[in-house]
Image: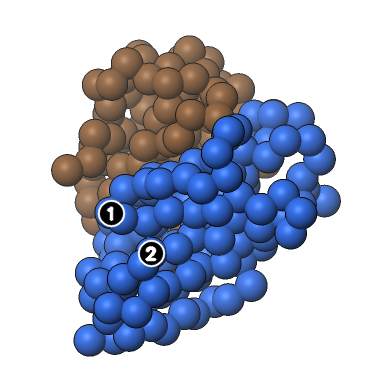
Amino acid sequence: DTEVTQTPKHLVMGMTNKKSLKCEQHMGHRAMYWYKQKAKKPPELMFVYSYEKLSINESVPSRFSPECPNSSLLNLHLHALQPEDSALYLCASSPDRDYQPQHFGDGTRLSIL
Amino acid sequence: AQSVAQPEDQVNVAEGNPLTVKCTYSVSGNPYLFWYVQYPNRGLQFLLKYITGDNLVKGSYGFEAEFNKSQTSFHLKKPSALVSDSALYFCAVFLSNTGNQFYFGTGTSLTVIP
């Protein structure tokens, strides 16, 4: 069982919809991450939160909007996505933004119609 | 550029045989190196890491890796492969001089043949 929980596991949405992905961890980790992963490719870093503050935004389009309501929760708000945004979205956490291993959730598989 | 490379997209090995998944790195300073595994429809799972110390690192599920500074390599090994080891393996490096981030290799798909 993973210690990082992501919901929903699957999401199908149209290009005009608004939806949100949710990530939760209760390990007391202070760094949380969003990654995008295409099939059989490495994860691509999207956003990093450290102590609930956004510290890295890897030039992600504004149709992706992250939010960190508290130290255990991370959301990714989606609006007006494109078909090329279809991918597996992974959330991860680590004790701090250092070289400690990241703990990954099982992801949300997103399909854009 | 600082990075890790996985030269093989696909590795096939017979069950019971030793397996090796290759990783080379190119970083300035001391590298912090990691191996992750991804099973189908799952997230990445941490296997092992090299930070400092003994060059042979032991990790989860019987995997180990050897840090070789002269060859700039960090190959993942297991003495006897299981069918359940079939998965996607990623080598990663942590870089503190570019914003404290992990950079992943391109991944190697391992198939263990019964």
Q: Chain of mark 1?
A: B
Q: Chain of mark 2?
A: B
Q: Dot 1 corresponds to which residue?
A: B61
Q: Dot 2 corresponds to which residue?
A: B78
Q: Which mark is residue B13?
A: none
What separation in Å lies between label 2 and label 1 (alpha carbons)?
9 Å
Q: Which chain is brown?
A: A
Q: Nearer the viewer, residue A34 or A103?
A: A103
Q: Which chain is blue?
A: B
List x then y, in percent, for residue A87: 42, 60
Contact flag, marks 2 and 1 (Cβ < 8 Å): yes
Tell me the kind of residue under disc 1: Tyr
Label 2 or label 1, whichever comes before in sequence order:
1
The quadrant of the picture occupied by the C terminus of chain A is bottom left
How crowded pointer 1 is (Cα within 10 Å; few <14, some 14-19, many 20+) is rated as few
Can see residue A24? yes
